[in-house]
Image (cartoon, grey):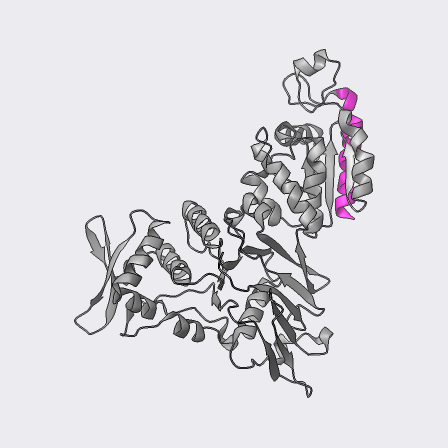
Amino acid sequence: MTDCSYIQSLKIKGYRGFSEGKIISFASPNGEPGSGLTVVVGANNSGKTTIIESLMAVSQKQSPTFSEGKRNKGAENRVRLELTDSEGGEVIVETVESGGSETQKTGTTKPGTSDIFVLKSRRIFSPFFGKNSLDRGQHINSHQNLESNRSAQQGLEGRIFAINKDPVKRANFTSEIAKIIDPPPDWTIEQSDQGQYYLKYMDSGFSHNSDGVGEGIISLLFIVDALYDSKPGDLIVIDEPELSLHPQLQNRIRDYLLEKSRDRQIAISTHSPKFIDWAAIAKGAEIIRIVKESGQSSVYSLSRPTRNKISALLSDLNNPHILGTDANEIFFLYDSIVLLEGQEDVMYLPKALESLEKRLNAEIYGWGVGGADKMEIIASILKDLGYKKVAGLLDNDKSSSIPNLQRQFPEYKFVAQPADDIRNNPRRQKKGKTTLLLKKNIDVDPRFVDEMKSTIDELNYYFDN
């Protein structure tokens, strides 16, 4: 590992939806893939963009200004941003004593602390451009202006010029792209008869100009450019890395970010489950969930004990679906989630509900939690992340687990369906176990109809009130 300090946390108070001081902690790389990755999730308008804007504000050389609409009235129209590093350095941006839009900036981070580069979600590449060249420092300085944070990110044209004229940079850039697309795109800079420059892109023996390059490829170039000449210890912030990218390319970008975050900090704000990696979370990656509560932004993250429980789940090779692709949606669901024991429950509960002409007013988590004994682990994840309405529906033969679950999570609801198993299973019936569904697994056994209806009503009352 490189001997350098890292950005440790950012405290936001009085800026946009953050009326009370909220702390965002960033992952610090430890040499493991993904250890330096921070993933910020949350619904639209929850406050994710505010975190990005705050990082831009504290990284500016000059003190930023905050217009009246950006200052939270609940915090007396005063903004205070505090950035701390792992060595005790601190930068504070706060409204001056007289109030208004002006701020003052004090403090400094320790030498070697990350340079912060923010890649915005609005990324535009001009098909035809003039001749200019930008090094990394110039590129960062030209895009850290808080007042233009909602404008498009440009400047890739100048970066391409700088890369193209330096054989070493071009070789490094191409090798980085090859980690995502192999073979990498073949390109050069060409000049039109009108004197404008453009990116000439060759593919399968055909060539076309910048105007014909797909938005997904352009987005990929922006991301690779933000990272290829970064140095260990840097903090690179990428807003919505999934933009215009095919799901398979999202997977490859995720793997690229995991590898890069071995020795540098990367923070992404995303709406895509493709960028969740459970193994990275267990190794130190941070998941930050931003939630709008009573009109204000709240911040939630996973505790160390919960991370340790995730490590235990990863070792369960008999139930890989517990933390599979569908489980990634746990970080992107709205509230009201129901936990079921296993895959069969997820498959057959909808059939039971259809038979009963009932509806469960909640989202089902993934393909089950992998057994009643693991329900506590998934509930811990949801509690840490600020979910308020979570219920567990267990089989009747596991109802003895309910009192302990209810003690651990008094704000959640745990109930048992009336049968020992949900689907018809001859082997279990031979052992004296009852099943909720009849032989063809379509209709609920008449013996359990009323009790099952009552159970669903009880859950819906919990979710709806």
Above or below, 428 relative to 110: above
Above or below, 151 relative to 390: below
Is residue 425 visible in this depiction of the protein? yes
Above or below, 43 relative to 426: below
Find the residue positioned furthest to the front: 3
Q: Quadrant of residue 417?
A: top right
Task: Name the residue located 72 percent from the left edge and 78 percent from the top edge.
Answer: 76
Task: Name the residue located 60 percent from the left edge and 53 percent from the top edge.
Answer: 287
Image coordinates of residue 366 in percent, x first then y, are 60, 38
Task: Name the residue located 34 percent from the left edge and 72 percent from the top edge.
Answer: 134
Please report the bounds of the magenta region as a residue range. 446-465
Find the residue positioned furthest to the left: 193
Q: Exactly how many numbered labels are in the figure?
A: 0
Residue 442 is inside the magenta segment: no
Q: Nearer the viewer, residue 444 or 1?
A: 1
Image coordinates of residue 316 in percent, x first then y, are 60, 32
Image coordinates of residue 461 in percent, x first then y, are 79, 43
Question: Seen in the image, is 380 located left or right of residue 105?
Answer: right
Image coordinates of residue 383 in percent, x first then y, are 71, 48
Please name the predominant secondary structure of the magenta segment in the image. helix
Q: Nearer the viewer, residue 54 or 311?
A: 311
Residue 449 is inside the magenta segment: yes
Task: Name the residue located 47 percent from the left edge and 56 percent from the top edge.
Answer: 241
Above or below, 221 relative to 108: above
Find the residue positioned furthest to the bottom: 98
Is residue 458 visible in this depiction of the protein? no
